[in-house]
C-alpha cells in the first residue's frame, strides 16, 4: 500500500465555504494517534438513504469505474453514507451539504448530508476531487495496491447563486448528442446546474418538430459554412448540419436530471429565423423578399430575414412550443427576442397594417407584441418566458390589445406529468434543483411596468444595464454580460489564438467577474437568480474547439457562480491559479482539450483563418 500522501492544499474548485481538517495541513496523525486520512477500498459500501438514489447510482457508475471498487450497497464502518438532512437544508439550502471524513461518526467512513438531493450530489463531486485526478478517468489506471485516501476533514458548503448556467449554441455548429452528454458531465464536475440549449438560429434548426417536419428536413442542414469571422473570405465547403430527435432530447433531459442540471431550451424569434423560413417560406415577409429563394444561412452576423407578424406565424410557433413543452420539464423556456432588424417590417404593407391594427406604434412595438404574446402563452401553461435583454424594449402602452391565445392543449399543462422527468405545478418543476424554487410565479393576468408578465426572466447579455432595469422592475435576471462571460471571446492577445474574436478575456478576467453590480438596491439584488457563461459557436466547429474556448475559464466562472468570494480586486487569484495546477490534471484525466496556461498547442491553432479581435478594455455598461 502507498503511504498516505501529504495534503498541502485541498485544491477544490469551486472553493467550498469551509473546510476543517483533522491532523493539520500535512494530514499527519492527530494527538490521539488517529491518521489524518480515510481510505476507500474493497470494503467500502454505499449506504443510500431516501432521496439519494441518483447520487448512489452515479457513485457506483463513475467512481466505481475509476477506482475499480465495487461500492456495493450496504451500511457499516466502511460505508459512504448518503442522507438528506432537514438541518442542512434549514442552514444551507437544498443545494448545500456537509461532507465529513473526520471519524466523527463511528459506523461510517464518509458521511454526506445534503439539504436536498442536489446537495448530496454536489458533495459527491467534492468527494471525487478529493480522491485525486485518477478518480476522473473512465476506467482504473492506478496500480494494484493504490490507496484511495481521503483527507480527514469536514467540508461545509453551499452555492452563492441558484442559477449557475452554461449557454451552448448548437445551432451555428451542431454538437452531436454524445458531446452534449459529455458537456453535462463537465458541468456537473464544476457544480453548474443550468444548461441553456440554443437550438435554433439562421444557420440551423436543431430540434425535431413532428407537426412541421421540414424544419429539420430542410432547416437543419446548410450547404457550406463561413470559415472564421463573417468578414473572412474563406469557406468550409463541407455541408454542415444535424438535429436532435424527440428521444435524443428526452435522453439529454434525463441525463441532466440525474446530475441535477436543468435544461432550458431556446427557440429564437422573431429574428434569427432564416433556417425556419428556408423550410417554410410563408413564415417570412414574402411581400418584401422572395422567401422561397432563401436557403439556410451559411455565414454569421445579424440577419435581415425575420418572421412575418401574422396570426399564421403565431399559430405555427405555438405548435413548435407545444412540442417543446412536452420534451423539456424546465419551468423556463427561452424565446431569444434579440437582434431583430426592422427593415423588412418597415417595407412590408402587411407589417404596417398589423402595426396600425394592433396600435403598437412602430416596428419596435411590433417586436414587443411578438414577445408579449409568447410570454402570456407560456404563462398560461405554467411556464416562464426567458429572453435576451431586448425583450425589455418597445413595450405596449396600457390597454394595447394582444393577440388571442390559442386554446389548443399541451402535454405540459399545470399539474400534469411532463416527459423527461418532473411535474409542473404552476410555474415550478418539482425537482431538487434550487433554481426552480424561487422567483415570481407565472402569471396569466396583469403585467409589470415593462409590459411583461411577472414571471418573465431576462438574460442580460449586452452588459449590466438591462439586468439592472429588469431587476428594479421586479423581474428575475440571469447576468451574462458579453464583456465578461462570452467564452467565444479570445483568451490572450497573442497571434497564436485561433480565430480570435472580441476582447481579451483571460482566466483572471473571468475570475474577477462580479454578477451583482454595485449600487443595486437590496430588493433588486434579490432578483439576480445567478449568472451564465455563453458559448457562441460560429468559430467553434467541433468539440475540441469548444473545449479550448471554455476551459479553463469555465472553472473560474464556476467558482464565481458557486463560491462566496470577496470583491473582485480582493480575490485570491494566486491561490486560484495554484489550485488550478491540480485541476488541470483533472481536466487531463477527463480528456478536456483546454487552453494550456502557456498558450495553444500547435494543433489548437488556426493559422491564416481571420477573426475579429477588439482591442482595449471592454466597456462596463
Image: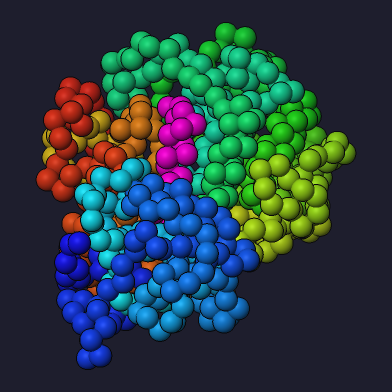
- Number of callouts in the render? 0
Magenta span includes 174:
yes
Residue at the (63%, 31%) spot, across then down: 247
Task: Work out which quarter of the rendered image holds the N terminus and state it.
Answer: bottom left
Which quadrant of the view contains residue 610? Answer: top left
Residue in the image at 57% along x and 18% along y? 219
Coordinates of residue 257 in the picture (x, y in percent): 57, 50
Decide whether residue 402 is among the magenta residues.
Answer: no
Stretch in magenta: 172-194
Q: Residue at 29% of width from left, 61% of height from top?
A: 148
The C terminus appears in which quarter of the rendering?
bottom left
Q: Is residue 303 above or below residue 58?
A: above
588 or 580: nearer the viewer: 588
Question: Which residue is rendered at x = 19% and y = 68% of the image?
Answer: 4
For the question of whether residue 392 can be seen, the reply is no
Q: Residue furthest top?
A: 293
Q: In the figure, 263 relative to 129: above or below?
A: above
Give the image location of residue 488, x and y in percent. 33, 40
**Residue 574: x %, y % from top left:** 17, 66
343 vs 15, nearest the viewer: 15
Residue 496 in view, yes or no? yes
Colour convention: rainbow
Q: Position of residue 258 (x, y in %)?
A: 55, 50
Amino acid at each position: 500500500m502507498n503511504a498516505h500522501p501529504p495534503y498541502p492544499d485541498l485544491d477544490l474548485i469551486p472553493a467550498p465555504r469551509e473546510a476543517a481538517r483533522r491532523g493539520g495541513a500535512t494530514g499527519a496523525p492527530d494527538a490521539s494517534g488517529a491518521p489524518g486520512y480515510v481510505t476507500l477500498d474493497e470494503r467500502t459500501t454505499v449506504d443510500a438513504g431516501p432521496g439519494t438514489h441518483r447520487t448512489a447510482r452515479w457513485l457506483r457508475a463513475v467512481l466505481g469505474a475509476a477506482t475499480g471498487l465495487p461500492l456495493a450497497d450496504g451500511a457499516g464502518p466502511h460505508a459512504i453514507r448518503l442522507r438528506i438532512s432537514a438541518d442542512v437544508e434549514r442552514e444551507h439550502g437544498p443545494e448545500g451539504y456537509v461532507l465529513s471524513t473526520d471519524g466523527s461518526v463511528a459506523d461510517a467512513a464518509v458521511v454526506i448530508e445534503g439539504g436536498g438531493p442536489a446537495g448530496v450530489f454536489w458533495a459527491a463531486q467534492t468527494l471525487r476531487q478529493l480522491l485525486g485526478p485518477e478518480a476522473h478517468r473512465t476506467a482504473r489506471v492506478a496500480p494494484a495496491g493504490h490507496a484511495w485516501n481521503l483527507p480527514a476533514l469536514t467540508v461545509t458548503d453551499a452555492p452563492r447563486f441558484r442559477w449557475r448556467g452554461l449557454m451552448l449554441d448548437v445551432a451555428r455548429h451542431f454538437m452531436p448528442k454524445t458531446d452534449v452528454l459529455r458537456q453535462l458531465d463537465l458541468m456537473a464536475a464544476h457544480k453548474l446546474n443550468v444548461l441553456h440549449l440554443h437550438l435554433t438560429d439562421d444557420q440551423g434548426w436543431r430540434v425535431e418538430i413532428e407537426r412541421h417536419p421540414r424544419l429539420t428536413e430542410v432547416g437543419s442542414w446548410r450547404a457550406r459554412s463561413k470559415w472564421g469571422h463573417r468578414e473572412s473570405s474563406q469557406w468550409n465547403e463541407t455541408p454542415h448540419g444535424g438535429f436532435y430527435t424527440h428521444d435524443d432530447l428526452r435522453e439529454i433531459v434525463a441525463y441532466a436530471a440525474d446530475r441535477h442540471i436543468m435544461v432550458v431550451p431556446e427557440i429564437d424569434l422573431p429574428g434569427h429565423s432564416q433556417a425556419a423560413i428556408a423550410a417554410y417560406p410563408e413564415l417570412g415577409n414574402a411581400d418584401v423578399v422572395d422567401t422561397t429563394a432563401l436557403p439556410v444561412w451559411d455565414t454569421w452576423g445579424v440577419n435581415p430575414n425575420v418572421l412575418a407578424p401574422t396570426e399564421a406565424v403565431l399559430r405555427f410557433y405555438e405548435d413548435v412550443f407545444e412540442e417543446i413543452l412536452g420534451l423539456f420539464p424546465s419551468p423556463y423556456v427561452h424565446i431569444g427576442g434579440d437582434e431583430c432588424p426592422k427593415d423588412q417590417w418597415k417595407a412590408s404593407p402587411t407589417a404596417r397594417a398589423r402595426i396600425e391594427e394592433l396600435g403598437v406604434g412602430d416596428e419596435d412595438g411590433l417586436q414587443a407584441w411578438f414577445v408579449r404574446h409568447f410570454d402570456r402563452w407560456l404563462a398560461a401553461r405554467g411556464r416562464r418566458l426567458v429572453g435576451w435583454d431586448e425583450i425589455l424594449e418597445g413595450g405596449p402602452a396600457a390597454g394595447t390589445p394582444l393577440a388571442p391565445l390559442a386554446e389548443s392543449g399541451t402535454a405540459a399543462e399545470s399539474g400534469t406529468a411532463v416527459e423527461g422527468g418532473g411535474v409542473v405545478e404552476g410555474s415550478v418543476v418539482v425537482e431538487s434543483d434550487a433554481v426552480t424554487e424561487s422567483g415570481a410565479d407565472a402569471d396569466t393576468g396583469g403585467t409589470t411596468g415593462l409590459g411583461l408578465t411577472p414571471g418573465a426572466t431576462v438574460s442580460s447579455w449586452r452588459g449590466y444595464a438591462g439586468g439592472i432595469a429588469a431587476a428594479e422592475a421586479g423581474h428575475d435576471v440571469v447576468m451574462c454580460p458579453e464583456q465578461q462571460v462570452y467564452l467565444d471571446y479570445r483568451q490572450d492577445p497573442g497571434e497564436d489564438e485561433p480565430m480570435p474574436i472580441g476582447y481579451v478575456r483571460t482566466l483572471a478576467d473571468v475570475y474577477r467577474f462580479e454578477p451583482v453590480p454595485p449600487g443595486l438596491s437590496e430588493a433588486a439584488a434579490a432578483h439576480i437568480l445567478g449568472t451564465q457563461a455563453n458559448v457562441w459557436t460560429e468559430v467553434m466547429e467541433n468539440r475540441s474547439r469548444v473545449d479550448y474556448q471554455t476551459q479553463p475559464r469555465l472553472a473560474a466562472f464556476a467558482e464565481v457562480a458557486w463560491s462566496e468570494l470577496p470583491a473582485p480586486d480582493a480575490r485570491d487569484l494566486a491561490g486560484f491559479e495554484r489550485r488550478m495546477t491540480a485541476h488541470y490534471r483533472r481536466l487531463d484525466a477527463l480528456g478536456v482539450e483546454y487552453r494550456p496556461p502557456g498558450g495553444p498547442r500547435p494543433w489548437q491553432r488556426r493559422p491564416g483563418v481571420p477573426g475579429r479581435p477588439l482591442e482595449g478594455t471592454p466597456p462596463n455598461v
